[in-house]
Image (cartoon, coloured by chain):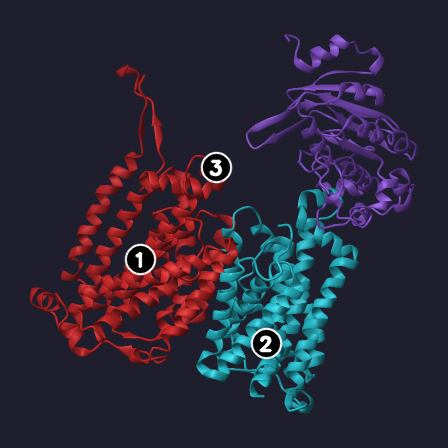
Amino acid sequence: MIWVDTIVQGILLGGLYALFAAGLSLVFGIMRLVNLAHGDLIVMGAYLILVLVTLLGLSPFIAVLIAMPIMFALGWGLQKFLLNRTLGDDILPPLLVTFGLSIVLQNALLEGFTADSQRLPTDALTTASVQVGTISLGVMPLLTFASAILVIIGLNQLFYRTSLGRAFRATSDDPVTASLMGIKPANIFAVATGIAMIIVTIAALYLGLRSNFDPNIGPARLIYAFEAVIIGGLGSLWGTLVGGIIIGVAQTVGAAINPEWQILAGHIAFLVVLLIRPRGLFPRAHD
Amino acid sequence: MALLHTDGLTAHYGDFQALFGVDITLDQSEVVAIIGANGAGKTTLMRSISGVLRNAPGMVRFDGANIGGQPADEIMAQGVAMVPEGRKLFPSLSVEENLLIGTYGRKTGGHWNLKTVYDLFPILRERRNNPGTALSGGQQQMVAIGRALMSNPRVLLCDEISLGLAPVVIKDIYKAVPAIKAAGASLIVVEQDIGQAMAVADRVYCMMEGRVTLSGTPDTLSREAIHNAYFGAAA
Amino acid sequence: MAYTVRTRTRASGIAAIIGAAIVLALVFLPLFASRSLIQDMFLILTMLVLAQFWNLLAGYGGLVSIGQQAFVGMGAYTLFGVVILGGIDPVAAILFSGLGALIIAIPTAFFAFRLNGAYFAIGTWVIAEVVRLLVAQWKTLGGGTGTSLPREATRDMWFVPTVETLLGVRSAAARDILAYWLALALAVATIGGIYWLLRTRRGLALAAVRDNIEAAKSVGVDAVRMKWIVFLTSAFGTGLTGGLIYMQKARISPDAAFSVTDWTAYVIFIVVIGGIGTIEGPILGVLIFFALQSLLADFGSWYLMTLGVLAITIMLVAPRGLWGLLSERTGLHLFPVRRQLVAPKPSET
């Protein structure tokens, strides 16, 4: 029975990793940009929520609603004024600029908040758990997982049911022809990064509620997100969720065998998938 | 006053100059054909007018206003739509989505909407949920034309719409031109097929090596003059 | 009329003479320099070597790795392993460092070459993390807390007694001087080796692959083979440097030896600021890096922020770095690799 429990916890953990990954996947899908500062932006989001909670005395769940538009604006500006200038055939500028951004963000957070660990305040609800048969499920992990599913459904609706979603897909296919439709690719990219930042804020909420965070943990979140995206196959959001679950289960199973193996087991799972299915489990047909 | 005209239009690809001072005009309700051999600069001309290839301000005027130097999305929003060479449907979008996205930057309303485009090309109604790229070449061309019409443009630029299609399919596609004209659009049609161009156009420009070498109405242009303008007088 | 092909320029001839003079001066530096200057110079030279190898990978090979810490750490741990467990002299053990990095590089390349562009970058990082976590499990070498080189090994290290008597310094200073000389030799060999590689047919093929992989394939360049050669060479050199750095430090831990900031971020900033895709760039970059470090040493994280902002700005404004700006303005090439077609002078015909 302990194994069933371990695996269920792992699946729920996968929801968190899918949340980390969804924004990365969205931005890559639309503009082929891998943002190496993605993990640090999640951590920054957690600090933003923390500041709102501390200053205004709000519940984290209210604070996240205020943080979302702020993060959207930030992502929009970041893309419009910085990252758009790096897009092109050469892969060096976007990589090196976002890597530089990652280092700048980490150190800015260190300067502003010190290296001490922080945590968002939890209450009775968020620390509660429900009993399903013999397994005890935390309300927090369940909420995280449900949020991941809602985010993916929401993104799919946006992509396949709205005019903006059509513009996203068209720009991803061919930005020049898209501009003949009256689409400004630079603006579409800015909106996409803004939306990715809204997802980042949701991920930040659960990151901060479930565990301690400090300015240096961003790169590790980027790596989990990246592994989930690659395992799932580029461009498939449900695949990303499956990828997150695989990393999550590998980590909890690894930790159950030996606590020191938790992170390592996740990475090994990723390498095994890369070995067997180099294009991921659910690769896109064209591309 | 001309609806659209270019004034000494030049264009460059890096160090290579592709257009050398091209002057053409398009009047209201007119169909103008641009003919010329491969590499004459026809597609470059279309790309320059539509803004895909940025040019200097003042080189292109539309409805009395300067549109030269503006980006493609702004030119499109003012009512100059383009059917690009090679059709360029969006592979991620279905036929209907390809049509719908044609209105993204311009929602003025007018004769053209999903229903009237489907009436113009009935086969597209049947294939509406297919991916755009799953269609035959001729059907894809219809989608590309329909997509441009959806914005109810005042000027429609058609770049090599018959390229690579069977004669019977080309005929089907050109059958749409009167309806497009009747709905209020003026057309610039780039054609390699001289016969087709003569049949559809009110006026013809012939281009060679980045310059206009001949212009006139189809009935005033002799076969020999066109031949010389097409291939050069020495040929 | 006979045309000749040449790569030498007038500036490169003068540069070669000045370069030789500088190297000679650096060899004799320990005779009169303070110990702290020698330590600084050791750091500058080792960072320069790391930067040259990353530049070979990213600037010439188009392989943007952010997992260089895997090779530094692996090189360093191999050195500690063979010294502590095998009783081999630390100086000789440096060679094993290169081999240790090479052993990790082969499976790394196997995995990472399945990923393209940006994903290659993160892939190398994941593998560096895996190596770090595995090494931290190695209890004989101190596990997660790390270990030190045994006192006897460092005291009786090859050449150290000789340096002691030659220069009349204490053992610790003699070790620093020895490490400095090794770093100098490594830097000269690296720059010379890379310059040589770029001027061979292989080097030309490399430039072709970077500029246009399809075109390069069509003229018969084996792009995959080039990628392997560049990746393994770079791993070997980075491993050697890692071994040398930790021979000098004599104390190791997984977090330090596999630090992405120290061994990859700094290195990337040095190359980007100095000028990616040139041999001169990393040299200029490492000098700027150390100037900034001594200026901002007291400001902690502001230092890294400044470096990051500077690198971002340069990438956007001058993608070829400061050396690129300089050589564009002046036409200066100290290490010319471009072949120039030279028409004979009219009087000779």
Q: Indicate the chain on which mark 1 is placed.
A: C
Q: Indicate the chain on which mark 2 is placed.
A: A
At 90% from the left edge and 29% from the top edge, which residue is drawn?
B178
How far, Cα to Cα, is label 1 from label 3? Answer: 29 Å
Q: Quadrant of the N terminus of chain B?
A: top right
- Secondary structure of the residue carrying numbered label 2: helix
- Where in the figure is residue A151, as x and y percent of width and height? 70, 69
- Quadrant in the rendering for residue B132: top right
Q: What amino acid is labelled 2 in the image?
A: Tyr
- Secondary structure of the residue carrying numbered label 1: helix
Q: Indicate the chain on which mark 3 is placed.
A: C
For label 1, the residue is C236
Q: Is residue C295 visible?
A: no
* Horizontal relation, residue C62 to residue C284: left or right: right
| Tint of chain C | red
Query: Can you tell which mark lies on residue A47?
Result: 2
| Tint of chain A | cyan
How far, Cα to Cα, is label 3 from label 2? Answer: 49 Å
At 84% from the left edge and 39% from the top edge, which residue is drawn?
B149
Q: Nearer the viewer, mark 3 or mark 2?
A: 3
* Horizontal relation, residue B233 to residue B27: left or right: left
Q: Along the polypeptide, which appears first: circle 1 or circle 3?
A: 3
Q: Quadrant of the C terminus of chain B?
A: top right
- Where in the figure is residue C293, as x and y percent of width and height? 37, 64
